[in-house]
Image (spheres, rainbow, N blue to C red):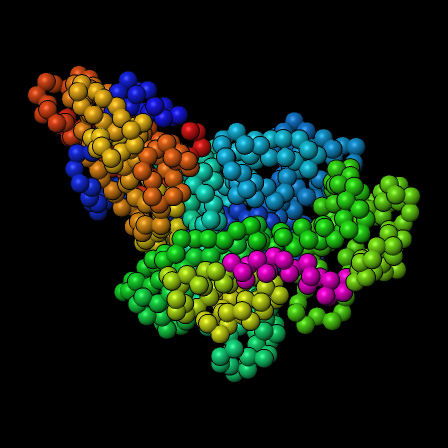
Amino acid sequence: TSTYSSPAKSLGDPGITPLSPSHIVKDSDAEDAVEQLFLVVVAIDFGTTSSGYAYSFTKEPECIHVMRRWEGGDPGVSNQKTPTTILLTPERKFHSFGYAARDFYHDLDPTESKHWLYFEKFKMKLHTTGNLTMETDLTAANGKKVKALEIFAYALQFFKEQALKELSDQGGSDFENTEVRWVITVPAIWKQPAKQFMRQAAYKAGMASPENPEQLIIALEPEAASIYCRKLRLHQMIELSSRAPVNGYSPSDTIGTGFTQGKEHVRRNRQSRTFMVENVIGEIWSELEEGDRYIVVDSGGGTVDMTVHQIRLPEGHLKELYKATGGPYGSLGVDYEFEKLLCKIFGEDFIEQFKIKRPAAWVDLMIAFESRKRAAAPDRTNPLNITLPFSFIDYYKKFRGHSVEHALRKSNVDFVKWSSQGMLRMSPDAMNALFKPTIDQIIQHLSEVFDKPEVTNVKFLFLVGGFAESPLLQQAVQSAFGSRCRVIIPQDVGLTILKGAVLFGLDPAVIKVRRSPLTYGVGVLNRFVEGKHPPEKLLVKDGTRWCTDVFDKFISADQSVALGETVTRSYTPAKPSQLVIVINIYSSEQDNVSFITEPGVKKCGTLRLDLTGTDAAVPNRREIKTLMQFGDTEIKAMAVDVATSKSVKVGIDFLNY
C-alpha cells in the first residue's frame, strides 16, 4: 500500500466515483441576487509600512474622501497615511496605532518601555510564513510573542472605529457598521491562506461575519490600482516616456518638472481630502482598444506585485492575462541595506544589542532615515544628513569604549562621514547604493515578465504604490522599459490603491476574469486499469477493482475563472448502499496532479453528505452533484444529492487543515 493512507480505505469507504464528463455551468444562483444596499464604501489599504483608509458614499460615487489628517505626522512626509505600527499595553490590551503608538512608545522611559509591546512592519509576516495558521505568532520589539490574528484584528478594529467616527461626525448622526461595505487590500502574490487570514481578522474586528461575508471584499492591490488608472486624465499623471513631449515639455526635463508641477498641484490641494474621480474613461484609456494590454507594477513597502490586464470592450471590463507575480522587493529592502551599512560601521553585535536595549531610539533612527530616503534622486549632488539619536551615540560609547566618530574614521566606509552637528553624512552615491539591490531585483523581475508570451505588446506600464514615489525607481524603470511601452505614474501615486479599492467596492463586477492561483480537485475512486494505474493504488471492493487516491480536477492553476463562475461535477457512491458520502477537496500549486498523495497536494475542505433517512425509491446509480463557485478570495463548495435535493455547503479553508 502507499505510504499515505488512502481516504477510501480510512474513512470506512464513503468513496465516490465520477459519473459524468465534467462540464462548466455559468449560472448566478438566485440566492446571490439579494444585493445588499450599503450607504458607504470604506477601503482600507493596510500597508507594510503605512496604512490609510478612504471612503465614498454610494449616492455620490465620484467623490472619494481620503481619511482626515493624523496626529503627529513626521516632517518631510505627507500624512495621508499613518505608519503601520501598533502598541499594546504590558497587559496585552490595545493601546494605540500609527503615529500615536510610535510617539507614545518613544516617550516611555526605557525601564518601562521594555514591558510594552510594539509592532511595526508586521504585515510581511503573512507573506513570509510558509504554514500560516490561526496560531501564527508575531514578535514585538521587546521580543515577546503575540498571536498574529489578534494584532491584525486590533489594527482593523482601529480603522473601523476611526472611519465610523469620521462618518458619524461628518453626517451628524451615528453611523452603523451595517451601513458600510468594507474593502481591504492585499498583495496579489499572497497565497490563499494569507488572504483568508485577513478575512478572519476582519471578522474578529467585527467588520463583517461568516453569515454576512459579502459585507467585506478582499481586493488585490494591483487590481485596485488598475481600476483607478483607467480613470486618469492627462493632468493626473506624469508620463516618463522618451517618446513625445508631454504638455509641451521635452522628455529631458519631464522627470524634474513634471514632478515639481505635480507637487505644486498636490500642495494646493493638500487641504482638501476629497478627490473627484470623473466618471469618464480617461484620455489615456481612450487610446486603448479592445484586446490591448497594460501592466500594473505595484511597488510598496514590503512587496512588489505585477499584473497584466487586458481590456474587454464595450464596458471596459478587465481580464487578468498573466497570474500575478512579484516578490519581497519593497522599499523595506532599502532599510535593510541601511541596517547592513550600520552593522558594517558600528559592528553587528552593537546594532543587535542597541535594537533590544533601546528599541524606541532605533525606531527614531529609522524614521530619520525614512525622510532622507525620500530625498534620494538620480541627479542629487549634495550629501544627505541623518541625525543619530543621542542615545545611540551615548550607548555606543558605553558599549565600545570609543566614540561614534572614531568608529566612522576607523571603518573604511569612505562615503559616510561624521558631521560636526552629530549627523551621518552620506554622499548621494552611498544612498543610491542602498537602493540598488532592491531596484535591480524589481527590474530583473519585470524583464522576466516582459519576456513571457502573454505579455507581448504591452502598451502602458503604470507604476503605482508608495515606492513608486522614488525618483531612483522611476528612472530605472523608464530607462529599462521606456522603449517598449509608455511608463506612467499617477500623480498621488501613494493613494492610487486606496482610491481604486473604493471604486472596486462601489462596483465589484468590474474585474471579470482572474487566473486561478491553485489547482483544485476532489479525491475519488476510478475503475482500476491495468498498466495505467500504479498497482499500489489497487483496492478491491465487492469484486470491483478500484484505483484509490485519484485527484479529479475541478480547475487548474492559471486557468481563467470568471468571478462567480460555478464548476460542476457529478459523482456516484462507489457502493450503492452507502449512506454517508464524504467528499474531500484538495489543492495544489502544480498543474498536473494525478493523485492526492503527490507532494504539495493539501486538503482544504470536506463535504459530508448524510443520506440516511431518505426514502427507498432511490435510483441505483445515485447522482451526487458537486459544485465549486469561485468568488473574490473565497471559494465555496457544495454537494447535492440529486434524487432528494439534500445538500451541504462548505467554504474552502486553508488555515485549519
Residue at x 30%, y 44% (from the top left corner): 555
Q: Is residue 444 magenta?
A: yes
Q: Please, is residue 609 above or below residue 462 in the view?
A: above
Q: Is residue 498 visible?
A: no
Rendered location of residue 546, percent (x, y): 23, 27
Most prominent secondary structure in the magenta stretch? helix
Residue at x 52%, y 54% (from the top left corner): 304
Q: In which quarter of the view is residue 597 placed?
A: top left
Residue at x 64%, y 49% (from the top left corner): 71
Q: How many marks?
A: 0
Rendered location of residue 73, percent (x, y): 66, 52
Q: Is residue 309 left or right of residue 443?
A: left
Q: Is residue 418 magenta?
A: no
Residue at x 57%, y 47% (from the top left corner): 48
Looking at this view, is 286 or 277 the one in front? 286
Q: In which quarter of the view is residue 621 placed?
A: top left
Which residue, as the protein is rendered here, is positioned at the far right?
A: 401
Q: Please, is residue 386 above or below residue 248 in the view?
A: above
Looking at the rendered image, the quarter that the C terminus falls into is top left
Looking at this view, is 246 or 474 the one in front? 474
Q: Which residues are magenta?
A: 425-445
Rendered location of residue 211, percent (x, y): 35, 32
Q: Please, is residue 646 above or below residue 283 in the view?
A: above
Rendered location of residue 354, percent (x, y): 78, 41
Q: Is residue 256 visible?
A: yes
Q: Is residue 604 left or right of residue 416?
A: left
Looking at the rendered image, the quarter that the N terminus falls into is top left
